[in-house]
Amino acid sequence: MKKENTVNKKLRNPILICGRLIHEIWFDLKHIHYGWDKERKDYNYGPARNQYSEEDVIIIFEQLGTLTQSPFVQITNLRDVEKRMIFYVYDDGKKFKLVVDFMKNSATVVVTIH
């Protein structure tokens, strides 16, 4: 994710996840669309893997308030991340992985949807 492409959006209704009440989320649409190349430390090349809009990301995230599930915790070495969680969400009948970081500064970041 790149700071210059990251946006902050408020949720319509707060969502409680793992004891954290979330009112807003942060995300980078370009990262969601293309993914990240760790070697180049930049977005992947090629066609976009999805065409989600900002509103789509909010709607998909808000599913977490209605789905009953236990997220998978993924190990991460990022120093600012308190906990990285993997959720499974649905869009148009298809199952997607939603990666969410709970940051140490209390921000909630949607890392990607794929």
Image (cartoon, rainbow, N blue to C red):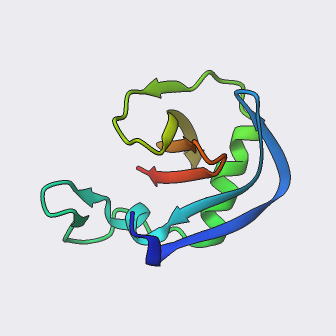
Q: Position of residue 83 (x, y in %)?
A: 52, 33
Can you tell which quarter of the image residue 41 is in? Answer: bottom left
Give me the residue at 72% from left, 49% from top.
62
Q: Position of residue 29 (x, y in %)?
A: 48, 69
Give me the residue at 64% from left, 51% from top.
107
Q: Is residue 95 visible?
A: no
Q: Position of residue 86 (x, y in %)?
A: 49, 34
Q: Position of residue 91 (x, y in %)?
A: 57, 51
Front residue of 4/112: it is 4
**Residue located farthest toward the right when viewing the structure as drawn:** 13
As drawn, 105 above or below 52: above
As drawn, 28 above or below 101: below
**Residue located farthest toward the bottom when viewing the structure as drawn:** 4
| Quarter of the picture holding the N terminus | bottom left
Can you tell which quarter of the image residue 3 is in? Answer: bottom left
- Image check: 19 left or right of 91? right
As drawn, 73 above or below 106: above
Q: Is residue 53 visible?
A: yes
As drawn, 53 above or below 86: below
